[in-house]
Amino acid sequence: MRRQFGGTLLSAALIVLLTQAAFAKERSHGDDRASFGSEIVVAEGERAGDVACAFCSVHIHGDVTGDVAVAFGSVTVDPGHSIAGDTAIVAGNLNLGEGSRVDGDLAILAGEALVAEGAGIHGSRSIIPQPLGTLILLAPLLIVIGIVWLVVYFVRRNRYQFPAYPQGQGIHPPPPARR
């Protein structure tokens, strides 16, 4: 019984892995771009699929047929161009030129959307501006710092030995009250 269950589990895992690869190819939009630390530029007349970058900015002079995800950078869309999918930006801004558009949803944490006249966002918007967005970004770090501080505090408190005063020194009880 145990051996049969292990074989079934292995078969199910293999089927899931194989189908994920098929779905990934089906969802691909073609010329996907990814970068870390150097900006991504979609040139005029060019089409890009999904675009993702960290610690960099994305400049769109052409069109993006997929999603855009940027961490610690900004997205600039030239007038008349578009992003067909969703856009997610952490600690950065979205700059839409005149007549440009985002067809999917927009999510910005610790930034803002600068939308020019005639530009549009056709999906839902979720924008958390500064300083609340920065506080949300730093919350996990602040929690870890607080836990470390508490551990250090309790360890030091238990190790500290209060001084023992010799007889006749230190804090004396108050004298008895006279009647």
Image (cartoon, helix red, strand yellow):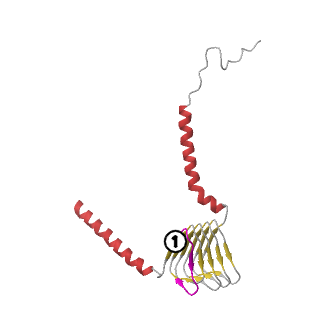
Residue furthest toward the bottom?
A: 45
126 falls in the magenta region: no
Q: Which residue is mark 1?
A: 35
In the image, is residue 137 above or below residue 87?
above
The quarter of the picture where residue 70 lies is bottom right
Q: Residues in magenta?
A: 34-47
Residue drawn at (42%, 81%) of the image: 26
40 falls in the magenta region: yes
The quarter of the picture where residue 117 lies is bottom right
Locate residue 3 relative to residue 12 in the image: left or right: left
Residue drawn at (59%, 21%) of the image: 164
In terms of depth relative to the viewer, which is nearer, 127 or 176?
Answer: 127
Residue furthest toward the front?
A: 38
Q: Secondary structure at mark 1?
A: strand
Locate residue 125 relative to residue 28 in the image: left or right: right
Q: Position of residue 7 (x, y in %)?
A: 25, 65
Name the kind of residue labelled 1 in the image: Ser
Residue drawn at (52%, 72%) of the image: 52
| Quarter of the image with the C terminus in it | top right
In the image, is residue 78 above or below residue 164?
below
Residue furthest toward the top?
A: 179
For the question of whether residue 1 can be seen, the reply is no
| Quarter of the image with the N terminus in it | bottom left
Q: Position of residue 103 (x, y in %)?
A: 58, 81
Q: Position of residue 132 (x, y in %)?
A: 65, 61
Q: Position of residue 30 (x, y in %)?
A: 46, 82
